[in-house]
Image (tube, coloured by chain):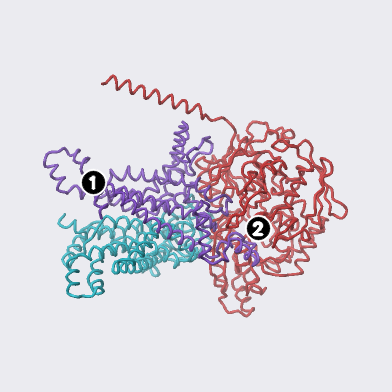
Amino acid sequence: MGKKLKFGLVAVVASLSLVAAAGAALHGKAATTTLVFGASADPVILDGALVSDGESLRPISLIFQGLVSLKPGTTEIVPQLATSWTTSKNGLNWTFNLRSGVKFQDGTPFNAKAVCFNFTRWYSFPGPLQSDAVSYYWSSVFGGFRNPVAGSPGPDKALYKGCKAVGANKAIILLNRQSGGFLGALALSVFGIASPQALVQYKADAGTVSADGVFQPTGTFGTQHPIGTGPYMLKSWKIGDKLVLVKNPTYWGNANSPNWSRSGKIDQLIFRAIPDNAARLQALQTGEINGYDNVAPQDVPTVRTNSSLKIVNRPPFNVAYVGINQSKPPMNNPLVRQAVAYGLDRAAVVNAFYGGRGQTTDQFLPPQLFGYAKKGVPSYAYNPDKAKSLLKEAGLTLPVKIDFWFPTNVSRPYMPDPSRNFQAFQASLEKSGFQVTAHSAPWRPDYLGTVQSGGAQLYLLGWTGDWGDPGNFLNVHFGAKKDQFGFDNASLFALLAKADAETNLAKRTALYQAASVAVMKFLPVVPYVHSTPALAFKSNVKGFIASPVGLDPFWLATLG
Amino acid sequence: MSIAEIESQTFTLETPTGGLWHEAWRRLRHDRGAIVGFCFVSVFVLAAILAPWIAPYGPLDQNLELITNGCCPGPSSEHWFGVDQLGRDELSRILWGARYSLVIGVVSVTVGLSIGVALGSIAGYFGGAVDNVIMRMMDIMLAIPGLLLAIGVVAVLGPGLFQIMIAVGVTSIPIFARLIRGSILSQREADFVLAARSVGVPRRTILGSHILPNSISPVIVQATLALATAIIDVAGLAFLGLGDPDPSRPEWGAMLTNTNEYLQVAPFLAIIPGIAIVISALGFNMIGDALREALDPKLRGRA
Amino acid sequence: MLRFIVRRLLLLVPIILGLSILIFLWIRALPGGPTQALLGERATPESVARIRHQLGLDKPIYKQYWAYVRTTASGNLGVSISSRRPVTTEIRERFPATVELAFSAMIFALFVGLPLGFFAAKRHGSAFDHLSLVGSLIGISIPIFFLAIILKYIFAVRLGWLPSVGRQDVLIEAEHPTGFYVLDGIVTWNWNAAWDATQHLILPAIALGSIPLAIIARITRASALDVQNEDYVRTARAKGMSPGIVDRRHVLRNALLPVVTIIGLQVGLLLGGAVLTETVFAIPGMGSWLAQAIFNRDYPVIQGGVLFLAIVFVFVNLIVDISYGFLNPRIRVS
């Protein structure tokens, strides 16, 4: 009995170890330099023209490239797929000289035809793709479609007129009117050039509209075959699990940056979605991720004091503000708006909540942008008594009832804890003659939907710049009538339009300075902080230069 | 909700007559669990009632200067439970928070109990098709996991303290309905009922004067347990963002959720409300448990 | 027996029908409705009217319901607004995660709860008995998400013993034929992956299983106490049977009956608790999916997901009912 048992035992152990060894052999890990980055959500789709959220744009900005880009860490425009450009005398035709010898990740050549194919594709989007929920940036920059459906602007309203390919290396973009911000907009990842062959082969525009009205892409371009010219390409993407990018072996930049083949460069980038900010920090501490974005101000000291972690600052390029909807009385009364401005204790909020990483501000523009007014800006320092007297002057009985909205379920770079900002503002407003009713909604779609359609009287919001021009701050918000702000100020619109059309830098600066002061006198919003967002990494991640607009050059970082 | 439902299925309670109430009370008095539970509950209720007088600060009084050096200063002599991320005294907020939890618990249990007992009585009284329809409705309600049902109700009603109370109350309706119906059904064939019927006492009177009073004890036990669950479920709803839209109100569940981001720098801000929730729920659970043991006829005669 | 099963199955029909009506009405009762979610900031009156017509929302309600039943019965649960993928695809990917989590939680609850309750009953009145009673009471008094946060903070962040997020380490290459990560690892002979997946399950299973653990312990204890004092057990002991055999053959077997019923009912608890647990541990299961869908007003997801879960729940209860009928002949006859 004993011998049989012993023999049986040995047999079992032997077979188990065989199986274990076989398993290990089948699934051994190869050694590649991998960076695991904690994102706040899964990307929606890897097709730049169809998205506007930061988490989709992060991998998109690594797979695709536009005609121009920004110098890492700045908003300075530098050549990318276009090496140089000229404008015609009337400013309506932009000629781009394209880089030669560039190939898409599927081997097809990059040329002028490819550029025009992409622009034409965006301009010719079919009906379901024309809604702001899908193609926000094309609408907001180029403003129109070739075959508009009901509710969409057509060729008459559009900035974009057409695209002409001249030879292999010259592409001409035709505009309907002058625009100072056009070039900067081209640096956006949404306007990255994709391989025409892949777009067609994998049916990038194909899709059905379900019974619920949702556009469902049936092609696999944006989910499995996003082909661009960028330094990284898609290896695999499983929603809810991870998105894996690997180095593009035929990247044109290899030849130009010998540093690329230096050891330590990141061969593999893995993005995993961890929705909760506190959970991202914990995952970094346990080593499950190597880095994440939007570190909460109170966590910065925690990261700094941990010797295996480090903080990388993102250059400040944002603004947080209390928005005012003037279509909801008494907000149409300038005295009331001034009372709101005097009633917000902005300095206390910035000093207490931003951990030294916020700069209290009196202007909508961040100081890094030209056009930031150096003088003449009215200052509304916290003064509850002045607020009360202004309200009385406006003929109102105190306390004045107002509805104040803030978003839940979100952490923005300029507003890490919206609920906290809200509560502090609520308290100071209530000392200044107001009675605040709290309203909240989850960030997307409810909060944004309510605020942007004019449903909120007072609300917390902000803005991170997309490119280095004051128009991206002032014109986008105050250049035309918007439901969000509910006002129709013809002189302000005219001033901003004039500033945007001005191509001479000195004159443009002066005009925008005047506009900035005018905005603060009109008070459609009360800005309160420009913050310095932070990313956290393991200490062995070096050379990461954070971009003010979120175009982070992962290819420059090394794992030491 | 579901927990109480599960437990109620395995235990049947006979209603005590005068003598049994005495015996139950005697047993309760000596039951250590009941005493401890009673202590917890009294602390909770006293805190809720006396909060305006014993709280050292106002629950909404912010003092941003206290947190300029970062969040957040922990327990100290001026602030026994420390200070939260807006400079408010945590002890005062906990005390005032007891009021919210108490009101929420009582209101939601009342909602569930009254509607549930009414529906269950109707089903048991009329029997037949009415019974079938009502019980199928209860089955459908039970087919949706409790938390999801509460979320569904809040989604329709919108966020707000009152709406949450209704939502949590609604989830306990099927349990009370089933309880009462079961009690009525089991008593319908009892001797005393048959005797009363044969004498000509109308069914209504039998139901109101005999059957319902006899069903009180399981309902009481259930109500206590449901109170405990209500406190916990409201915290869960707050965690999912479906709580009170005004974040400055010192409701424990919201306090627990809003401080999740400060866990690394000020863990006490999350731990203290959490412990408060646990202690209150525990108190009610202990009492409900002890009540059930005290009223269980099967335990009669056992030490 | 067959009649019993058939009767039970027939009962299902009105329940599922009732569920579909309830969910259908509920979606339309939600503030803002499906149209606002789709249009968001571009909700002009014309586009709202256009979408309403597209979705058939301007038809009479019974026609809408009939259309809804037809599309649902054909297996089409719509398309998610946030991810733009079919709801059925998402369910297929996320359901295994939740099942794996719930299953692990139940195993944890059973493995710890059954012996706990059993031995507490054996040592009735001792300190162990009292402690286990109090412990189980505490178990049902702790909010699941609170427990999850504390477990994560202590064991993952502070001690570093276990991972804090997800189902698997991103650096591990593994195939997933079944969708149950632990099983996948075993089936593909990838022990690393199987062990890693197990590690990711431990903390969430403990948090989720805390309440079922408490309940199982209490019910086992109560039931074992009852059986222990039954005459036939006393007779067996008096006859001189060894306590171990008495325990196994009589007490345990009969004490388990109520526990079996409980298991089915706890599925509902587990599904509700999964919503909270998955959110804390960032597990891509149906719980966190539904929670996010509610925030994002993703109506197709909510509609399809809740209906699916409810039907699963109903079927599980049916199976429990039937198996209880097998175990306890008295139920069959009633």
Q: Where is A144 relative to A341, above or below?
A: above
Q: Which chain is cyan?
A: B
Q: Chain of mark 2?
A: A
Q: Secondary structure at mark 1?
A: helix
Q: Which quadrant holds residue A360? A: bottom right
Q: Colour of chain C?
A: purple
Residue B69: give x, y in percent of width and height.
54, 55
Q: CA distance from mark 1 to mark 2?
A: 68 Å
- Judging by the rendered image, the residue that carries numbered circle 2 is A319
**How many numbered badges does the structure rendering display?**
2
Mark 1 surroundings: few (<14), some (14-19) or many (≥20) residues within 10 A: some
Q: Which residue is mark 1?
A: C254
Judge whether C227 appears above or below A177 on screen: above
Q: Colour of chain A?
A: red
Residue C77 x/y as whole percent: 52, 53
Q: Quadrant of the C terminus of chain A?
A: top right
Evaluate whether label 1 is on the same chain as label 2.
no
Q: Which chain does the residue under circle 1 lie in?
A: C
Residue B104 shows up from this direction: yes
Q: Do the numbered discs 1 and 2 sit on residues whose CB atoms are within 8 Å?
A: no
Expressed as whole percent of the image width and height from the top left, the position of residue B117 reads 32, 67
Task: Pick the residue in front: A233 or B58.
Answer: A233
Which callout, 1 or 2, points to the residue nearer the camera?
A: 1
* Farthest right residue in view: A89
Using the image as rendered, state which of residue B88 and residue A556 is in the foreground: A556
Q: Residue B138: percent from the left, percent from the top?
A: 37, 62
Towards the viewer: B43 or A119: A119
- The amino acid sitting under disc 2 is Val
Q: Quadrant of residue A424?
A: bottom right
Most distant residue in the left direction: C239
Q: Secondary structure at mark 2?
A: strand
Mark 1: which amino acid?
Answer: Asn
